[in-house]
Image: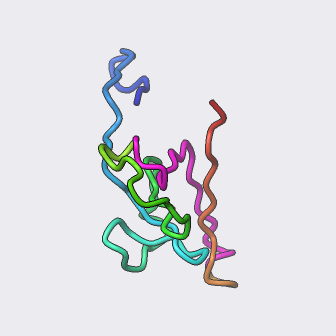
Amino acid sequence: MCGVYAGRRFNYERAPNNYVARLRDGNLLNAAGGPLQGWLAQPGLIALDDIPVAPGSPMGRGEDDPKAAWVDEVSFDLSEWLDTGYGVNFRRGVA
């Protein structure tokens, strides 16, 4: 994770390897599985709960989990959320 902040210095650090959210049945949930308010969504590792995984698959760190996706960008559209109950959009970078 990196960025330029106050003082105009380039700051970088290792990205956290814990889940920031879960995606289940098309709904974005918090890391514990409860409802996630759209304005609290943030980039990071998201658990894709609906993907089947073969028994014996390696499940070490979060970034090694085959059911994990790194989301680079999250946006929230309040008007869409008020109209439909949805409004969180996320983009996964292409490696």
> Furthest-top residue in view?
9
Q: Relative to 20, is 33 above or below? A: below
- Measured as percent of width and height from the top left, residue 5 is found at 38, 26
Q: Is residue 20 left or right of residue 41?
A: left
Q: Quadrant of the C terminus?
A: top right
Q: Residue at x 68, y 84 (%)?
A: 84
The image shows residue 27, relative to residue 92, as above or below, that is: below
Q: How is the image coloured?
A: rainbow
Tell me the quadrant of the picture where the N terminus can be found: top left
Count the labels in the image.
0
Q: Residue at x 31, y 40 (%)?
A: 16
In the image, residue 39 lies at what x, y percent?
47, 65
- In the rendered view, tell whether residue 63 sits above or below residue 89: above
Q: Is residue 1 above or below residue 40?
A: above
The residues colored magenta run: 64-81
Residue 44 in the image, given as x and y percentages of width and height: 44, 47
Q: Is residue 8 left or right of residue 87?
A: left
Query: Along the line of sight, which residue is nearer the eye, 56 or 47?
Result: 56
Find the residue positioned furthest to the front.
Answer: 56
Residue appearing at x 55%, y 64% in the figure: 51
**Residue 7 point in image, percent of width and height:** 33, 18
Residue 1 included in the magenta stretch of the image:
no
Residue drawn 54% across and 70% down?
Answer: 50
- Residue 75 colored magenta? yes
